[in-house]
Image (cartoon, grey):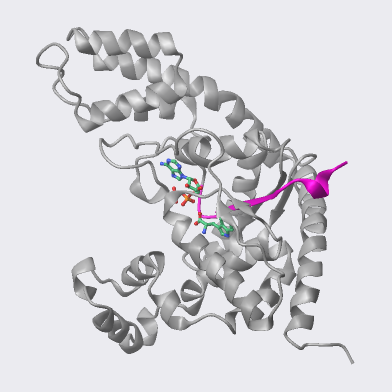
Amino acid sequence: MSENKKEIVLSGIRATGNLHLGNYFGALRKFVAIQDDYDCNFFVADYHALTTNPDPSQLHHNVKSVLAEYLAAGLDPEKSTIFVQSDVPEVAEMYLLLNMHVGIGELMRTAAFKDKARKALGLSQADDDNDEAFEKQIIGADTNKRVNAGLLTYPTLMAVDILIQKATKVPVGKDQLQHLELTRRFARRFNAFYGVDIFPEPTDFDFGGAPIKVPGLNGSGKMGKSEGNCVYLIDEPKALTKKVMRAVTDEGPQSPNAPMSEPIANLFTLLELCSTPDVVEHFRSAYADCSIRYGDLKKQLAEDILKITNPIRERINDILADEAYIAKILKNGAERARQRAADTLNEVRHIMGIRKF
Ligand code: ADP
Ligand code: TRP
């Protein structure tokens, strides 16, 4: 096998809940499509989940469910290395080492940190318009309302996930691009500081087609776990249909070829992702000549979503029931992921002067 010649792809999803159509079309379906052409590594980010979801019983469940959803959607453990972040202890050690080269200022300035720190402190956006006020809030926060250090060093950990595998292509959504930029900066900095060339600079990976933003069912914005507007892969048919039938619409087109409002445009985006072109065309012309009935569109959309999610949901349930299968995949995945991680960590320890006596 010429596996070593293939470019190394790595991506992960945090174990914070069930996966939805946004995750599926935006990430998972693409992961599945590239498995033959790249050296693929996909993991469940449980350490990262701990920065915001410290409940131990939830974490274990969420790791299992994301993993089952990966597999049910078509990630193949024969083709891709599939693992859990905390099964690679080398990551934790390298996180400690890389942190010696990361500035707290650059971490504090990342958008995701500001956003999450604000939430932890119960602040609104307006409370910290300037960086100085924001920093004071963090430093002055009492220990019950603290911003945990893991949240601050989230980008270091993500950089380590990537650099320890020497991945060059990292498929992530727009919100993660700043973290990827930091990863490149840390890689350059480490190489330059020690005069080595150990880390390649990873880039975003948009394999084919324009980036997709899957809209939610509530009329505006993207589908997201924290938005309460999701269709989950695991949703039962009845509940799923009910959700779709309740999707926000408007009063209907008032004149032929009227422009579409956002809620309707969003429903058409979902229809384009899930239905066949003739179905889309049928509803587009019904919209154009004002004969459209949104109820019919939503009914069709629910049916077509179910054609995609039904087989995945059934597989999710089968996989979740098979503990031995999950354990075997994770054992193999961890072994494979640890090989390269251990090699990189050894190099890093040596470069930094931690040598064996
Ligand atoms: P969420 O926003 O629901 O918390 P995550 O941040 O865990 O989802 O995203 C995991 C992956 O799924 C990322 O690669 C992200 O780009 C992708 N993704 C999430 N929501 C959407 C969406 N609505 N449209 C397209 N891709 C999405
Ligand atoms: N931070 C990513 C997210 O929230 C998850 C993640 C952790 C990740 N480590 C990674 C993604 C490494 C790609 C590569 O979606």
Q: Which residue of the protein is positioned furthest toward the left in this rendering?
A: 254
Q: Across the whole image, how many numbered discs are drawn on residues? A: 0
Q: Position of residue 130 (x, y in %)?
A: 23, 77
Range shown magenta: 1-17
Q: Position of residue 162 (x, y in %)?
A: 63, 61
For the N terminus, give its image quadrant: top right
- The quadrant where residue 315 appears: top right
Q: Is residue 58 magenta?
A: no
Q: Position of residue 5 (x, y in %)?
A: 80, 47
Q: Which residue of the protein is positioned furthest toward the bottom in this rendering?
A: 357
Q: Is residue 328 visible?
A: no
Q: Is residue 13 magenta?
A: yes
Residue closest to the eye, 98 or 149: 98
Ligand 2 positioned in quadrant: bottom right
Residue in the image at 51% along x and 69% along y: 154
Q: Is residue 279 visible?
A: yes
For the C terminus, give its image quadrant: bottom right
Residue in the image at 77% along x and 52% along y: 333
Side (left or right) of 55 relative to 138: right
- The quadrant where residue 14 appears: bottom right
Q: Is residue 24 above or below residue 250?
A: below
Residue in the image at 72% along x and 70% along y: 198
Q: Position of residue 173 (x, y in %)?
A: 47, 49
Q: Is residue 239 above or below residue 71?
A: above
Side (left or right) of 154 relative to 63: left
Q: Is residue 1 above or below residue 285?
A: below
Side (left or right) of 210 relative to 64: left
- The quadrant where residue 15 appears: bottom right
